[in-house]
Amino acid sequence: MAQKNPEQQSNDVTRREFLAGSAAALASLASVGVFTEAVGKTFSKNDTITAAIIGTGNQGCFLLERAVKLPGVRFVACCDIQENNLAKGLSIAKDAKGYKDYQQVLGRQDIDAVLIATPLYLHAPMTIDALRSGKHVFCEKMMAYSIEDAKRMIRAARQTGLVLQIGHQRRYDPDYQHAYKLIKDGILGRITHVRAHWNRNASWRRPCPDPKLDELINWRLYRRCSQGLMAELGSHQIDVVNWMLEETPSAVVGVGGIDYWKDGREVYDNVQCIFEYPSGVKFIYQSITSNQYDGCYEQIMGDKGTMVLQIGKALLFREPKAEQLVWQDMAHKEKVQGKEAIVLDASKTTRLQEQRGEGERVGSAQKGTKDAVVLELEDFFRCVREGGQPLSTGKTALGACVAAIKANEAMDKMQRITIPREVYMV
């Protein structure tokens, strides 16, 4: 038998580690029926929270770069099965120790909290293992690969009494919080329709040095690992709509296909869906990968006006028949496609802080001083330190998870899929 060169041996080992780690993680889901309650550490104001991150790819390092700058938090461990990813993580968290096996990280008794930024199908097993080991968990969106996995995560957090936060950061964006307050105050009147899209012109495929590692590196393109565009992009925007409407979809219909990128992928390269809500609101959603026109935003339409929300800007368009707002003449305005838009300024409101949990509030931030990712991480570590629930909980994230998965089902079956209320119950 021919001897393999060191590079081939390294690739084979990495592949074996990936498959073994995945199998072990998935197998752990079978044993989550009974929990022993974990007791979270009690922190004083000046105590340092010791943290770790599992998954130091692009998104994990994006989180880590911000998290290491938070006061009162120290990262002592980074974990990834890919050597180059692990090296990137360790270059950011300079005092951390590197691991390839996430169970070794969870076995450390000195770690209080973990960030999880791994492929979607590993979210649930890794989160549940982390909670059972006594760690608070921040897990990236979409919450889980399946609805039942998402519910297991919620049950694990409930039974251990530890914090579980999901990375839907738009809930922390000051403009989005400001928009939510105005919508609650009735500025749009009766909401009837929502449109949202996330359009890109790129394949979503990453360079792969060895075909054997394609599923590891390009996991988003394969159904065993991924729920496709609806999960990776759509879940963000579904979460926004659920939040603004304060309800979750009751039915969905849609079409999708692999129509442009003929490269062996298994998930759709374009999706178009219509969600129905119990109130009668219709939400039209699109994500495509062959044209970036219009980019990404949510458009919420009522009989008194339209709100257009995107990262960095929020605009209000008043309907001609709507009554004049008392502050409308003083507001900053700009012309958009021939229409006058009021530019919403979150820093001008005295009610930016939205109540959460048992009377706790998220600290206000002047627009532009901190991005939404920093704010969501601050909220996570605040909840670890002080108790209480974050703005983006497992329960709120379940709504987006259910809707995205049901949208995929509707597109696969080419049917209108009803979503009974009990599907959202845990």
Image (cartoon, grey):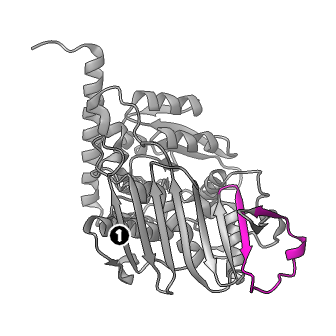
- The residue identified by callout 1 is 406
Q: Is residue 77 above or below residue 364?
A: above
Where is residue 293? Give x, y as percent. 56, 52
Give how far across and how far down residue 270 sits, in percent: 40, 56
Magenta span: 311-335
Residue found at the very far left of the displayed protein: 1
Say which residue appears at 42% left-offset and 58% top-offset: 231
Horizontal side, residue 222 vs residue 153: left or right? left
Q: Does residue 392 sit above or below 110 in this rendering?
A: below
Q: Residue at x 30, y 62 (%)?
A: 32
Q: Does residue 331 belong to the magenta stretch? A: yes
Residue 330 image-quadrant placement: bottom right
Mark 1: secondary structure: helix
Q: Position of residue 190 (x, y in %)?
A: 63, 86
Q: Relative to 67, does residue 392 appear above or below in the rendering?
A: below
Give the percent coordinates (x, y) of residue 368.
Answer: 76, 52
Q: Quarter of the image containing the C terminus? A: bottom left
The one nearer the camera, 322 or 222, is 322
Left or right: residue 259 compared with residue 277: left
Measuring 72% from the left and 76% from the top, which residue is drawn there? 182
Question: In the picture provided, is 249 more to the left or to the right than 241?
Answer: left
What number of labels is visible? 1
Of residue 300 and residue 85, the one placed in the foreground of this image is 300
Residue 163 seen in this snapshot: no
Residue situated furthest front in the rendering: 338
Relative side of 38 to 186, left or right? left
Q: Quadrant of the N terminus?
A: top left
Can you see residue 169?
yes
Within-10-Å neighbours for mark 1: few <14, some 14–19, many 20+: many
| Closer-to-camera residue (357/268) | 268
Q: Amino acid at mark 1?
A: Lys
